[in-house]
Image: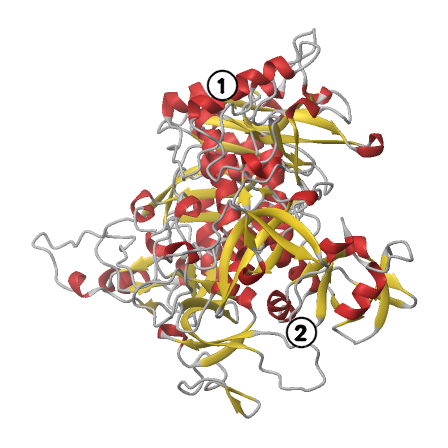
């Protein structure tokens, strides 16, 4: 890093920075994400004095507590003043640093204007609104820099959910109704695209105006400390009334450092510069498909020692300076604007890169900050851990995607029947496990391999939906699984890294988790999808959730229950009802931790009848079959009636049932009867429709390891078993081999009488059937009818 690069533009004479690593100074400790500044005069005194060597440390003033500290410049990143004001409004240091690196939300905040429509997060709920103010709301003369907030007028369902009328501490910043205004940092605002209906003045586009002095790609020159500097214009934009040019100077080569120069200080050169940038072409990129295939095939000639050709998704090792070696996976292959050699964009396993997949303002692939690196393709060597041996062991190179992922969303349907068997069955099939990932592997395989009930997670633009996580889930996991039957461990790790950042949890990349923790995080906090279940208890306020945990006391009369019985008893004991039919019903079994389970066996209910669990739905009399008007919880366990189903009666049958001396003390409750069921049919009996959901997957756990059973067809024997860590190649430097097998033996036990199944020793059960009946952790049901509307 040259010292001139370290000085950002500073209109007020101050240079602002953000710490990228934790730092200790004396007795004080500053977390990464803290912000600081120094005066331009002090900066120049440190770095431009010709009589002393360049300094490696910079004396700065921390914005949080105004303390003066000396910090190594290697952990400081320059920040423009406008960017710094937005970042200051973000409370958490880690979250602030994440948004600085991620840039997408920050860039949208910088482009936002009053009058633009947004969606904001208030008390974990999302409401529509309109930006009415952007700027500081803390008037203090002592502050060097004040944080910038968005003043939003809440609309629709958000009315009266705010906390002011556009005023803050006695100062009016905009006008709106009482309790309809709110001030928020940019990370709590989802910026919607500007439409013609928005009352905004959109920022101009310089390229659209006539007589443009400089355009993107032009060779330009400008002065830095009276020294003529040349470079290439990478972006042209306007802030307020002033135009700026984002320039990549020649001498900075591949450091990915830019300078933002006022337009009137930049001169367009009439002749191309003789630098590496003289061959710059704005449309250089991936190129047409046939060109890309030609380039990939050429890489075979650049590989040494007869190794397989390196291409997209090849696992590679790279030797850095001082002999340090890093590993990663190639995400892009091609030619970059100013480089004559064929390059590889590599996503590293560790934070030893310099980019997030961006080169000179253009993204060639996407990865976490500091995980991306562009190097010569010939500098990459195949990762020796994943090569074929002479004994014919598996190689991950044989199973990788051999083409660049599509730039636009692509859809592959779930696999069913013979297609599922053909694509998914075998070794190195399913999702490859790595570093305690089985909880996520099993959940993802269950939810997406053979059903589309939650495919809206892959495409639908939910409020606050994280598009990066959504694209990783769709393009790197679900589509490869459905297309080729195999997903790399690297792809799942990519998702886990994003969950670690977005979920503010440091252990998603290496620690054991529970499937419900993963599902709640990705569905609720990251994608923001509508809750799968809406429940009501005893007429109280509705409750939303994504997974339902069965809670119940030990049931002495239940030895080997089925899922239907467990759900009914759990709902009855908690006085719960479903407000609406769910498209997906995920049910956690009554077990606690990874060891204790309430029942030694649980019978899978292939169909889950939820008719009697629905709120304000017509019910059927359990005696005569007519429309029920009364429900009796005390009759639920009466052995005279059926083994399953809540006990509800028509008025006639209720009088007869409760005339018995053992039931005279019962107190039935009245049910709501829909208007259309008040009239009796000509036959005298009004038929009540049944609402049923079908089982599509079961997650099981044994000794801290998760596996899954998936139903891939309509017959009882149409089951497949998935284990992401079924086998292993090598020792600690090896890799796991996932496996998918068919398990038709499950049907044999589903057809057994209950008394026979209860006495069946688990160790004597065929194949993997014992794991389905004895180790069930989570059942997944779907309503294909409702999935059409969700």
Q: Residue furthest front?
A: 270
Q: Nearer the viewer, residue 243 or 482?
A: 243
Residue 462 appears in view: no
Position of 571 compared to 45: left or right?
Answer: left
**Relative vertical location of residue 306 with respect to residue 46 in this rendering, above or below:** above
Are the residues at dot 2 and dot 1 in contact (C-beta closer than 8 Å)? no
Disc 2 packing (10 Å; few <14; some 14–19; many ≥20): few
Q: Name the residue at 72% across, 85% down.
A: 142
Disc 2 element: loop
Residue 606, position as x, y percentages in the image: 40, 37
Depth check, mark 2 against mark 1: the one in front is 2
Q: Label 2 vs label 1: CA separation?
A: 52 Å
Residue wearing tag 1: 294
Residue 729, position as x, y percentages in the image: 70, 20
Disc 1 element: helix
Residue 144, position as x, y percentages in the image: 70, 78
Q: Name the residue at 68% across, 66% down.
A: 92
Residue 373 appears in view: yes
**Relative vertical location of residue 411 with respect to residue 384 in this rendering, above or below:** below
Residue wearing tag 2: 12
Residue 363, position as x, y percentages in the image: 54, 42
């Amino acid at each position: 890093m040259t010292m001139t690069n370290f000085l950002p533009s500073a209109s007020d004479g101050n240079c602002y920075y953000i710490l990228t690593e934790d730092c200790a100074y004396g007795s004080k400790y500053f977390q990464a994400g803290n912000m600081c500044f120094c005066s331009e005069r002090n900066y120049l005194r440190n770095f431009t004095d010709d009589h002393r060597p360049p300094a490696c440390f910079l004396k700065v003033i921390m914005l949080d507590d105004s303390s003066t500290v000396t910090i190594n410049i290697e952990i400081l990143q320059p920040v423009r003043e406008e960017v710094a004001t937005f970042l200051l409004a973000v409370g958490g240091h880690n979250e602030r640093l994440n948004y600085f690196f991620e840039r997408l939300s920050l860039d949208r905040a910088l482009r936002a204007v009053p009058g633009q429509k947004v969606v904001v997060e208030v008390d974990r709920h999302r409401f529509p609104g309109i930006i009415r103010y952007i700027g500081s709301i803390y008037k203090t003369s002592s502050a060097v820099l004040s944080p910038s907030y968005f003043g939003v007028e809440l609309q629709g369902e958000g009315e009266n959910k705010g906390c002011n009328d556009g005023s803050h501490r006695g100062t009016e910043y905009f006008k709106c109704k009482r309790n309809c205004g709110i001030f928020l940092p940019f990370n709590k605002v989802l910026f919607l695209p500007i439409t013609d209906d928005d009352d905004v003045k959109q920022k101009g586009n310089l390229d659209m105006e006539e007589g443009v002095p400089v355009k993107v790609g032009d060779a330009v020159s400008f002065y830095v400390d009276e020294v003529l500097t040349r470079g290439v214009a990478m972006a042209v934009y306007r802030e307020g009334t002033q135009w700026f040019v984002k320039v990549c100077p020649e001498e900075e080569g591949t450091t990915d450092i830019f300078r933002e120069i006022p337009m009137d200080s930049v001169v367009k050169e009439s002749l191309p510069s003789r630098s590496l940038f003289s061959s710059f072409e704005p449309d250089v990129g991936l190129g047409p498909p046939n060109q890309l295939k030609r380039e990939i095939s050429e890489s075979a000639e650049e590989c040494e020692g007869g190794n397989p050709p390196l291409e997209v998704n090849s696992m590679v090792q790279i030797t850095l300076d001082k002999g340090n070696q890093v590993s990663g996976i190639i995400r892009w292959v091609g030619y970059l604007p100013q480089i004559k050699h064929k390059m590889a964009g590599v996503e590293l396993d560790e934070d030893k890169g310099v980019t997030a997949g961006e080169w000179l303002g253009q993204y060639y692939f996407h990865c976490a900050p500091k995980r991306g690196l562009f190097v010569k393709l010939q500098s990459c060597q195949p990762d020796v851990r994943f090569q074929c041996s002479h004994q014919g062991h598996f190689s991950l190179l044989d199973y990788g995607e051999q083409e660049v992922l599509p730039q636009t969303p692509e859809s592959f349907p779930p696999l069913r029947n013979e297609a599922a068997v053909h694509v998914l069955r075998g070794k190195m099939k399913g999702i490859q496990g790595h570093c305690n990932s089985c909880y996520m592997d099993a959940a993802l395989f269950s939810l997406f391999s053979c059903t589309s009930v939650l495919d809206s997670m892959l495409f639908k633009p939910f409020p606050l939906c994280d598009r990066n996580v959504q694209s990783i889930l769709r393009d790197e996991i679900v589509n490869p699984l459905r297309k080729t039957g195999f997903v790399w461990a690297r792809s799942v790790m990519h998702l886990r890294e994003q969950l670690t950042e977005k979920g503010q949890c440091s252990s998603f990349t290496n620690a054991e988790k529970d499937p419900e923790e993963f599902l709640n995080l990705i569905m609720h906090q990251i994608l923001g999808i509508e809750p799968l279940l809406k429940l009501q208890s005893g007429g109280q306020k509705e409750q939303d959730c994504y997974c339902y945990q069965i809670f119940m006391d030990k049931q002495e009369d239940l030895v080997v229950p089925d899922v239907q019985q467990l759900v009914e008893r759990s709902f009855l004991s908690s006085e719960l009802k479903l407000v609406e039919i769910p498209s997906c019903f995920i049910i956690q079994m009554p077990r606690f931790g990874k060891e204790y389970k309430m029942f030694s066996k649980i019978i899978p209910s292939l169909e889950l009848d939820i008719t009697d669990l629905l709120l304000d739905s017509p019910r059927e009399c359990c005696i005569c079959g007519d429309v029920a008007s009364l429900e009796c919880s005390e009759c639920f366990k009466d052995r005279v009636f059926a083994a399953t189903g809540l006990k509800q009666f028509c008025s006639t049958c209720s009088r007869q049932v409760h005339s018995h001396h053992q039931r005279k003390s019962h107190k039935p409750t009245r049910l709501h009867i829909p208007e259309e069921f008040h009239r009796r049919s000509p036959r005298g009996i009004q038929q009540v429709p049944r609402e049923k959901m079908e089982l599509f997957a079961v997650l099981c756990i044994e000794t801290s390891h998760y596996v899954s059973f998936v139903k891939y067809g309509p017959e009882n024997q149409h089951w497949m078993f998935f284990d992401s860590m079924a086998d292993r190649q090598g020792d600690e430097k090896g890799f796991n081999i996932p496996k998918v097998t068919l398990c038709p033996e499950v049907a044999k036990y589903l057809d057994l009488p209950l008394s026979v199944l209860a006495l069946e020793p688990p160790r004597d059960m065929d194949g993997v059937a014992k794991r389905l009946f004895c180790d069930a952790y989570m059942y997944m049901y779907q309503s294909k009818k409702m999935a059409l509307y969700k």
